Image: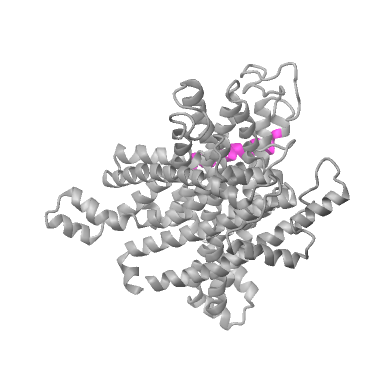
């Protein structure tokens, strides 16, 4: 276990280094300098700006400078918001995005696992068909449609929940969390139904039933541990999807999180901000994938033995 | 051709008996026909503006209403179908070409080549590709062909894994060894012996990739980083709809319904195809 963890962690380092370098040089390919404004800037000002941001150094020097900065947790200054550093913006946006993602995944797990397990137990009854039909809707209705529809219904027509914001009005966290969590609830429901069906047919479940365990104990103690491995393996990649979802949800609900900062940076061509957040997101996703793989391995006794 | 039941005739038989899949195929055919015939069947041009009319709810003259600039929504949905479906099919095609070649080469070569190629796939799997697409769109401008390429370049990974697995299984069968012994070149080995035998899984996965790609396009267009005006896809129509949904909710609802139905149809058809070609997986 520990061995695999260390090996995977060591592999992650060159990967992240490659991502960071690739992104750095891609950004350099981008047309236009960071200070190309609508108004012409005098050459002297431009020279000073370039000097201040170290843009007159050779690309190689800039690269080395930037990379050593990252190791110290310094992603450089933002090109669009003078006086603010990229690290600062990540630090303000990240907790918000994390909170949103946390509620979303909580909702997804609660709804997804319970309906998936129930559907597997009551196979081919309405308790199976109806949740699975809803899950299909969850998979086919994209987040960028689900969010506005929820706003239209609950925010504008019924006027029961706030239409935007984060932590300013009571209940304004509900709609964004549901919007982001719904698609994952759907996937998780399908995965846990499939996983449970597979496990429920196996001999050890029959044995558990034969020795007189209550159905509750059979399901919770024996079946779910194996049946939910697909769900656990899905959680790592889901983090990447949640991140993309947060771009949309934070834009729709005007939430000041990292996702919205990223989209704004993309529009404003705030290259340092894009660069910093890209590297940061990649590191985060590589880390979460690692965690979910390890958790899945730990849950599966067979792969536990191999290590 | 013999009359015995081949894999394909068997699969088609199973597919035609699957109501959900047939329904999906029916919807898809209608959509493709509508997209192809848009210039002839659309009641108005997609750019025709009736500024005096402005946004109007569905009526006899404009079945699905008009947008803020007085453009007929039905016509815009029909023209949007062209772009959305085009992105769906072309980007899937790109993913198909990369993924299938990668998978065949890795699976057939085996050994070191295989482990290096698949390790690359593993590594790429773990990266936040959506961010790289956004990055590319920002750096190189929001160009339709770049969009195809970028989305295709992201979606090939699973295809490569599936194809590699299939080829690994085929590689040790007698007919492949016989072909090898007869000195068949690598290229004709891929084309004549391997590819025809893995078309089933490829077809299934390609059908299921199309909705993924369309979602991705919609996502980018929604953020304003995908299709740019005056072109419009369903994603941009939904984006426009969201901006004015408080007063003119039909502008969000109709494009939204169209998009969702299309994704449903593609998923139903893809699931049906999978069940038809691989009866073992029907239970899931």
> Is B25 covered by the magenta stretch?
yes
In the picture shown, does residue B204 fall above or below B120? above
Residue placed most toward the observer, A282 or B99: A282
In the picture shown, does residue A4 fall above or below A79? below
Task: Please give the range of residues in magenta.
Answer: B22-38
Residue at 57%, 45% (x, y): give it: A259
Which quarter of the rendered picture does the N terminus of chain B lie within? bottom right
Q: Would you say A194 lies left or right of A251 here? A: left
Residue placed most toward the observer, A143 or B277: A143
In the picture shown, does residue B103 fall above or below A120? below
Main secondary structure found in the magenta portion: helix
Q: Name which quarter of the figure residue A21 lies in.
A: bottom right
Residue at 71%, 16% (x, y): give it: B53
Residue at 37%, 44% (x, y): give it: A112
Q: Would you say A134 lies left or right of B245 here? A: left
- The extreme right residue here reads A43
Q: Name the spot of residue A17 as percent of width and height, x first.
A: 60, 66
Q: Name which quarter of the figure residue B237 lies in.
A: top right
- One can see residue B209 in this view: yes
Q: Name the spot of residue B216 as percent of width and height, x first.
A: 59, 46
> Is B40 covered by the magenta stretch?
no
Q: Name the spot of residue B194 as percent of width and height, x first.
A: 56, 69
- One can see residue B5 in this view: no
Residue placed most toward the observer, A27 or B68: A27
Q: Would you say A98 lies left or right of B241 here? A: left
In the picture shown, does residue B65 fall above or below A286? above
């Amino acid at each position: 276990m520990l061995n695999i963890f260390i090996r995977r962690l060591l592999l992650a380092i060159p990967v992240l280094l490659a991502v960071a370098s690739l992104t750095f040089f891609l950004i350099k390919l981008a047309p236009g300098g960071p200070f190309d404004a609508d108004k012409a800037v005098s050459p002297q000002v431009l020279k000073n700006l370039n000097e201040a941001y170290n843009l007159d150094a050779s690309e190689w020097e800039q690269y080395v400078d930037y990379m050593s900065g990252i190791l110290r947790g310094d992603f450089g200054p933002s090109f669009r918001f003078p006086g603010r550093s990229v690290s600062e913006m990540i630090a303000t946006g990240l907790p918000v995005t994390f909170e949103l993602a946390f509620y979303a995944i909580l909702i997804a797990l609660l709804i997804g696992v319970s309906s998936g397990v129930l559907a597997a137990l009551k196979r081919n009854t309405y308790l199976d068909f109806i949740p699975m039909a809803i899950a299909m809707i969850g998979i086919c209705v994209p987040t960028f449609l689900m969010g506005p529809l929820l706003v239209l219904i609950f925010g504008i027509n019924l006027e029961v929940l706030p239409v935007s914001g984060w932590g300013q009005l009571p209940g304004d966290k509900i709609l964004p969390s549901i919007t982001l969590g719904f698609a994952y609830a759907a996937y998780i429901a399908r995965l846990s139904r499939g996983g449970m069906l597979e496990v429920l047919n196996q001999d050890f479940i029959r044995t558990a039933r034969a020795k007189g365990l209550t159905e509750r104990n059979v399901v919770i103690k024996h079946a779910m541990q194996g049946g939910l491995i697909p769900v656990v393996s899905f959680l790592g990649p889901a983090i990447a999807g949640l991140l993309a979802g947060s771009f949309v949800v934070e834009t729709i609900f005007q939430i000041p999180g990292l996702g919205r900062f990223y989209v704004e940076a993309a529009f404003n061509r705030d290259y340092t901000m894009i660069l910093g957040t890209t590297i940061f997101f990649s590191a985060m996703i590589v880390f979460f994938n690692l965690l979910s793989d390890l958790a899945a391995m730990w849950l599966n006794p067979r792969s536990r033995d191999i290590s | 051709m013999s009359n015995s039941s081949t894999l394909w005739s068997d699969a088609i038989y199973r597919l035609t008996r699957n109501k959900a899949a047939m329904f999906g195929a029916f919807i898809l055919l209608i959509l493709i026909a509508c997209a192809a015939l848009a210039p002839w069947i659309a009641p108005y041009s997609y750019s025709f503006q009736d500024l005096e009319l402005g946004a109007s709810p569905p009526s006899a003259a404009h079945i699905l209403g008009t947008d803020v600039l007085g453009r007929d929504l039905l016509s815009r949905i029909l023209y949007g179908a062209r772009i959305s479906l085009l992105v769906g099919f072309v980007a899937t095609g790109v993913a198909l070409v990369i993924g299938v070649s990668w998978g065949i080469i890795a699976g057939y070569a085996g050994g070191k080549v295989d482990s290096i190629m698949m390790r690359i796939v593993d590594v790429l799997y773990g990266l936040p590709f959506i961010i790289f697409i956004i990055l590319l769109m920002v750096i190189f401008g929001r160009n339709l062909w770049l969009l195809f390429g970028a989305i295709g370049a992201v979606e090939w990974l699973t295809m490569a894994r599936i194809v590699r697995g299939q080829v690994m299984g085929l590689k040790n069968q007698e007919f492949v060894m016989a072909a090898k012994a007869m000195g068949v070149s690598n290229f004709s080995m891929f084309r004549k012996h391997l590819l025809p035998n893995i078309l089933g899984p490829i077809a299934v996965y390609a059908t299921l990739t199309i909705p993924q790609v369309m979602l991705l396009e919609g996502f980018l267009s929604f953020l304003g980083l995908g299709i740019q005006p005056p072109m419009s896809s369903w994603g941009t129509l939904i984006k426009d709809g969201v901006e004015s949904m408080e007063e003119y909710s039909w502008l969000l609802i109709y494009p939204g319904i169209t998009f969702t139905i299309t994704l449903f149809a593609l998923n139903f058809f893809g699931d049906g195809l999978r069940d038809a070609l691989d009866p073992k997986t029907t239970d899931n």
